[in-house]
Image (cartoon, helix red, strand yellow):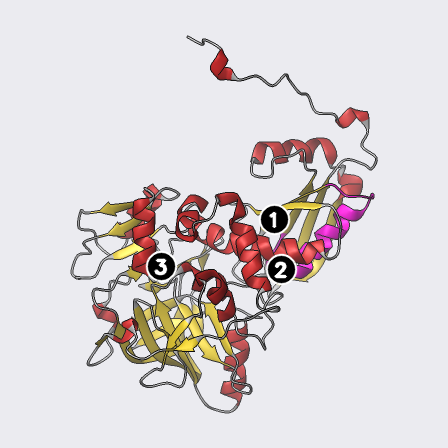
Amino acid sequence: MDLKDCLKKMQDAGRLAHVTTPVDAVHELGGVCAKLDGGKALVFDHIKGYDMPVTTGMWWNRENVAAIFDTPVDQLSSLFAEAVASLHQNPVTPVLMENAPAQSVVMPEPDLTKLPVPTLALLDGGPYFDNCVILAKDPDTGVRNASIHRLMVTDKDRMGILMDMGRHLRDYYERAEARGVPLEITINNGVHPAYFVAATTPSSAAPIDEDELSVASYLLGEPARLCRSRTVDVEGIADAQIVIEAEILPYVREPEGPFGEVSGYYAAQEDRWVVSVKAITMQMDPILHLLHPGREVWNGQGLGLEANLFRTISKQVKGLKKVYMTHGGSHYHVVLQMDPPSNGMAKNAICAAFAAFSDLQMVTVVNSDVNIYDAEDVERAMVTRCDPARDIVIIPGAFGHELNPVVHDNMAAKMGFDCTYPVPKPASYNRVSFAEVNIADYEVI
């Protein structure tokens, strides 16, 4: 199954819409996405100056994703947790195939300007790929890594790339650069979301010596399909819409940015790493896939992170019920729903969450009688169950996510809120309740 099959499944489920009006890839496409953010996935059928459509919005809401995986919305996180667990139980090795769909068309000379790569936000430094699965191999062991990093097109065969501190790709690159050699990669655009889940599996769940593509295999129900590249010793994803064969150059830095990031703010322009493109192949009639900053990132990363956090925290504390990466906090705030068996356990859960995912800036813990998807219900627990003198946990000088503007030199304080009632539950925390009725039995005019 490839991206086109996913679009058909969403179409059949009423989760896809087409923008038939021609749009400009520079700012106009991003503006349309901003107006429709959170609804049906979109296909832009006509991009001015190009003959290739663009799709986005697959991750705008969980109903879209559920349609692809034939899974109820409330079971998606569990499905992704099972996929990550397969890494350590029965990992499925990817297979190599000949005559891959992703290599049906070969550009005579690589030219990124022939692709409708959009400039989304008004202050973005240029066109950006922001939804490509990058495959690389460990320079020492050959273990494959899958990850997602933003890429700014700066020339027909050149891009700037951000490699966050602590990511496996950065580790691979630094060891290759120390030897004075480039790090070969493939940049795979327009893949099944199973590969996105694999590529965003946090390092706490997928150590550097494990191939995350096993996660994709589990979700696909068959081994992930790869293909040999023409110019680099790293495979491409056989069912990708577009595969860019490239290398990250050693000792070269060029301006990259600004870019409207997951934080909701612009990442500043700085001298960053440089990608040199060696070849571009694609499917017949390909579709370029972008990730619109905002809900797509929060849902796309959130579902996988929720699953990993649930597994990791549950091993250390009892009573955890649900985990939710909030939209208002992008992927810096998580709400934990739990009924602690003992006083103090909620604070242990806060510490476990920070250890499991270092990007977090805030953790809120509430009881199971609180709807963690309802911000008002969570806020009510905060103001009635959290005593600031004893229930706020502050961890100064912790490692954080460099794209969060509150983080400086990868360091910032983190904060947790214990909004659970004492154990045993005092009668004063019995919530107001009413008789259960079927409103259909009543005439309301």
CA separation in Å, label 1 and label 3 = 28 Å
Left or right, 40 with respect to 181, comes to left
The residue to which callout 2 is attached is 357
CA separation in Å, label 2 and label 3 = 28 Å
Residue at the bottom extreme of this rendering: 179
Residue 345's label in the rendered image is: none
- Residue 211, compared with residue 364, is above or below; it is below
- The residue mark sitting in front, 2 or 3, is 2
Quadrant in which the N terminus appears: bottom left
Kindly indicate the quadrant of the structure image that contains residue 110: bottom left
> Which residue is at a point 73% across and 37% down the rendered structure image?
386
- Residue 42, compared with residue 155, is above or below; it is above
Element type where label 3 sits in the image: loop
Kindly indicate the quadrant of the structure image that contains residue 368: top right
The picture places residue 82, in percent across and down from the top left corner, at 57, 58
The mark that comes first in sequence, 1 or 3, is 3
Q: How many marks?
A: 3
Question: Can I make out residue 268 in this image?
Answer: no
Kindly indicate the quadrant of the structure image that contains residue 90: bottom right
Highlighted magenta segment, given as a residue range: 339-361
Residue 124's label in the rendered image is: 3
Element type where label 1 sits in the image: strand
> Which residue is at a point 23% across and 74% down the rendered structure image?
104
The residue to which callout 1 is attached is 334
The answer to whether the residue labelled 2 contacts the one labelled 1, judged by CB atoms less than 8 Å apart, is yes
> Mark 2, residues whose alpha carbon is within 10 Å: few (<14), some, or many (≥20)?
many
Q: Amino acid at mark 3?
A: Asp
